[in-house]
Image (cartoon, helix red, strand yellow):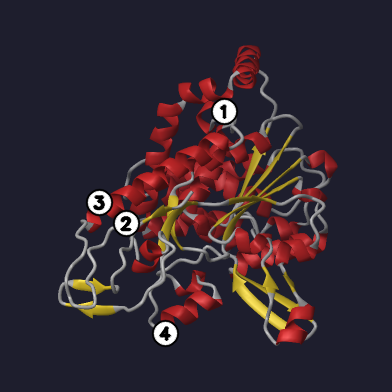
Amino acid sequence: MATILGTSSSAILASKPFSIPSLSLTSSGLSFGRKYYGGIGLVGKKGRPQFHVAVASVATDIGSVQEAQKAAAKESQRPVYPFAAIVGQDEMKLCLLLNVIDPKIGGVMIMGDRGTGKSTTVRSLVDLLPEIKVVAGDPYNSDPTDPESMGIEVRESVVKGEDLTVVLTKINMVDLPLGATEDRVCGTIDIEKALTEGVKAFEPGLLAKANRGILYVDEVNLLDDHLVDVLLDSAASGWNTVEREGISISHPARFILIGSGNPEEGELRPQLLDRFGMHAQVGTVRDAELRVKIVEERARFDKNPKEFRETYKSEQEKLQQQISSARSFLSSVKIDHDLKVKISKVCAELNVDGLRGDIVTNRAAKALAALKGRDQVTAEDIATVIPNCLRHRLRKDPLESIDSGLLVSEKFYEVFS
């Protein structure tokens, strides 16, 4: 649920269904005829104040109502397995956390065996997502301060100088089902309304809902290629354009794209894989004790989800604070020129096509340093993230048996030593 940052006069007026006989601005504040609206001291026609109630108390009441609504909504949600309770998949968890800290890394492709917790881990990320400022009632989750993340209507309102009602809301996570149609993903235009009323009647799709959030595609390697192309183009450009019957509508679509899949069911095309910022490989846990622990923890969760989540509450809150701190700290993290040169040298010697590998490695290393609370990137940070940033960008050799991540690590130590 959203939390109101500032209570506008229109929001307060809406709390009581009374008509407004007159509205004027006096030295003592707003005048609304003889009526009483939402707890503000009002002035009658003859200038006599009829009620005097502190505005602060109104804001407090509204805030408490919002908190109660948020708590009620949280209770009604389907319980999600805690992120902190997932063990044995550190590489995947780290890639997800780094993308939440810096969405410009470009998303994660998670490939691994069946039943290794890929979907569970991604969906457990919901609890850790920080809150962001959005324009109330906007279908695109427009940022009130960034024109690049604003919908057309919000941008026009800003140009006209109109006040925007701003609220705080959790970063949104949208699940894209395999059977989704292109209209459902991109949005559609109501041709009948456009012809009869002469207006652009646009029905936003999943890309609009995912703006400034996360779009998750399970079994992405089974998704139709043309839909994958649409998703990756939108993720790269930050905009989605819908063309129908001579009508064109564009809206912001900046999201973190997370895909998961089983390599046995087929690989993505190399040019599509390259559009994902990071690539995490997930394997089946082989340690018997660890497997038993995972089974027992899952049984506890299935038996009493609420009680199980309570046991991990403090760890979840600690992770939330780490992420929020890292996001605010990220802009101050620096990386030495010498380290940048070595990163590019690794990419060049591995014959990585394009410059995405260099850019993503720099960003991921800075995000990791921010997560650790440091303002300077070290070689150790780069060593941690560079296999995930370059593994999927190497040219495939069908005769090569060694894992591509090991090839990247070997080249890293050769260059950085």
Residue drawn at x 73%, y 62% as measured from the top left: 185
> Do labels 1 and 3 touch, CB within 8 Å?
no
Mark in front: 3 vs 2: 3
Mark in front: 4 vs 3: 3
Q: Which mark is residue 86?
A: 1
- Label 3 packing within 10 angstroms: few (<14), some (14-19), many (20+): few
Q: CA distance from mark 2 to mark 4?
A: 34 Å
- Label 2 packing within 10 angstroms: few (<14), some (14-19), many (20+): few
Count of picture labels: 4
Q: Which mark is residue 160?
A: 4
Residue drawn at x 21%, y 56% as measured from the top left: 54
Q: CA distance from mark 2 to mark 1?
A: 31 Å
The residue where tag 3 is placed is 57
Q: Pick whichever of labels 2 and 4 is earlier in the sequence.
A: 4
Q: Is residue 378 visible?
A: no
In which quadrant of the rendered view does residue 247 lie? bottom right
> With respect to residue 346, does 129 lie above or below?
above
Mark in front: 1 vs 4: 4
The residue where tag 2 is placed is 332
